[in-house]
Image (cartoon, helix red, strand yellow):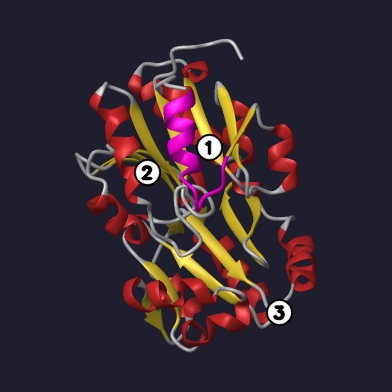
């Protein structure tokens, strides 16, 4: 690999920066601090919304920027300022909820300030293959009696998710939903993530690079799953985790160790700081 002076590294959260138990290793934080100290930008890159990221923003205050909602929002954490934002119209969100209901699936509405779920379904997240997130959801979500009724209080949403009981249901629902002007990513065991049309982590990286006055070829992206695909394609260097999906590893320029053994720290040291 030809050495290049990379200026920014974008780190996916689940399956990448976060370990299997959804925590960040102390040594990973040390590597992030080392990069920030020499003027490199380390960026969160996640499908999570702002309310879901609050504790991580507090845990690593040295990180100034975040790509959230799978690219629908680029956020300046330090200044609490939205640099870029796009959203799914309310009417489309209502159709997503209707289709989720038809499959007895769990829909999830994300606004800039809230994470909204059905109060009955959030108690049964294991049924939707999302048990590991349940404790977090119980703490941070706004729990309502009717998602459809909650939906009409907002003109649009940066992201909407559906958590299915079965992969077959996800595919059948996708066949109906693909007619709508939205961007899709297959996530977790049987989840479908929906973003505004032509919006990905990759398009968000372009907005952030422009904002920072750097070329996208000077960036590194690290990820493991389908919603990382476009940012890996657009970044100057694509790095996959050892635990990444097979097709993500095949498209990557480099592969680092898995998320339980500081793979992100390896990427920072080896490619951003070029210490190894």
Q: Is residue 258 magenta?
A: yes
Q: Give percent across and percent down for residue 177.
A: 71, 61
**Mark found first going from the N terminus, 2 or 1:** 2
Q: Nearer the viewer, mark 3 or mark 1?
A: 1
Q: Give percent across and percent down for residue 94.
A: 56, 69
Q: Which residue is rendered at x = 42% and y = 60% of the image? A: 155
Magenta range is: 257-270
Q: Which residue is mark 3?
A: 103
Q: Which residue is mark 1?
A: 222
Q: How many marks?
A: 3
Q: Which mark is residue 28?
A: 2
**Mark found first going from the N terminus, 2 or 3:** 2
Along the viewing direction, whichever of 17 and 226 lies nearer the viewer: 17
Around disc 3, counting alpha carbons within 10 Å, would you say few (fewer than 14), some (14 to 19), or many (20 or more)? some
Q: Is residue 163 magenta?
A: no
Mark 2: secondary structure: helix
Around disc 2, counting alpha carbons within 10 Å, would you say few (fewer than 14), some (14 to 19), or many (20 or more)? some
């Amino acid at each position: 690999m030809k050495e290049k002076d990379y200026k920014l590294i974008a780190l996916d959260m689940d399956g990448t920066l976060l370990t299997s138990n959804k925590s960040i290793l102390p040594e990973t934080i040390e590597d992030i601090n080392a990069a920030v100290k020499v003027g490199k930008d380390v960026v969160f890159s996640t499908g999570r919304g702002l309310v879901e990221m609050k504790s991580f923003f507090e845990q690593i205050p040295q990180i100034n920027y975040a790509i959230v909602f799978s690219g629908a929002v680029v956020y300046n954490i330090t200044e609490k300022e939205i640099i870029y934002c796009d959203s799914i119209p309310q009417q489309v969100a209502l159709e997503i909820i209707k289709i989720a209901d038809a499959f007895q699936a769990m829909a999830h509405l994300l606004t800039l300030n809230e994470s909204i779920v059905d109060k009955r379904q959030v108690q049964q997240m294991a049924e939707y293959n999302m048990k590991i997130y349940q404790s977090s959801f119980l703490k941070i979500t706004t729990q309502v009696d009717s998602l459809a009724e909650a939906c009409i209080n907002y003109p649009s949403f940066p992201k909407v998710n559906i958590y299915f009981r079965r992969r077959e249901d996800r595919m059948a629902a996708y066949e109906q939903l693909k007619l709508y002007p939205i961007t899709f990513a297959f996530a977790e065991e049987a989840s479908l993530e929906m973003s505004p049309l032509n919006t990905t982590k990759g398009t968000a990286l372009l907005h952030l690079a422009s904002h920072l006055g750097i070329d996208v070829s000077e960036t590194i992206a690290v990820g493991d799953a389908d919603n990382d695909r476009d940012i890996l394609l657009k970044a100057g260097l694509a790095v996959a985790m050892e635990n990444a999906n097979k097709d993500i590893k095949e498209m990557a320029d480099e592969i680092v160790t898995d998320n339980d053994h500081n793979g992100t720290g390896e990427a920072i040291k080896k490619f951003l700081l070029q210490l190894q």
